[in-house]
Amino acid sequence: MDPLELIEELNKILKNNRKAVHDVLLTGGATDYTNYMNLIGQLKSLDNVEQEFKEFLQKRRIQVE
């Protein structure tokens, strides 16, 4: 696998995971407060990973949507 393909695939996975968690939250799928907080934690983690990923790519001057 080409490094650019890997980068694109990782970016797609992050976006899909974030969308899945958003969908659960927006449709009232959290079963209780603990589950809700877990989902919020997942979103924060995905945001952190994406930010680190973007900073890493910027340092290497690689652009990905």
Image: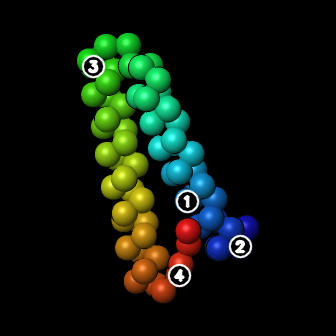
Q: Are marks 3 and 4 in contact (CB under 8 Å)?
A: no
Query: Horizontally, is 61 left or right of 59 in the view?
Result: right
Give the secondary structure at mark 1: helix
Q: Which residue is mark 4?
A: 62
Report, in whole angstroms, how far the alpha carbon at label 3 lies from the one at label 2: 41 Å
Front in this rendered view, residue 7 or 23: 23
Q: Which residue is mark 1?
A: 11
User: Where's the C terminus, which quadrant?
Assistant: bottom right
- What type is the residue that disc 1 sits on? Asn
Kindly identify which numbered label has been placed on residue 2.
2
Q: Residue visible at 62% across and 65% down? A: 8
Q: Position of residue 1 (x, y in %)?
A: 73, 67
Q: Earlier in the sequence, mark 1 or mark 4?
A: 1
Give the secondary structure at mark 2: loop
Report, in whole angstroms, how far the alpha carbon at label 1 lies from the one at label 4: 13 Å
Report, in whole angstroms, how far the alpha carbon at label 1 lies from the one at label 3: 28 Å
Q: Are marks 2 and 4 in contact (CB under 8 Å)?
A: no
Report, in whole angstroms, how far the alpha carbon at label 2 lies from the one at label 4: 14 Å
- What type is the residue that disc 4 sits on? Ile
Front in this rendered view, residue 32 or 59: 32
Q: Earlier in the sequence, mark 1 or mark 2?
A: 2
Q: Position of residue 62 (x, y in %)?
A: 53, 81
Report, in whole angstroms, how far the alpha carbon at label 3 lies from the one at label 4: 38 Å
Of marks 3 and 2, the one in the foreground: 3
Q: Which residue is mark 3?
A: 34
Report, in whole angstroms, how far the alpha carbon at label 1 lies from the one at label 2: 14 Å
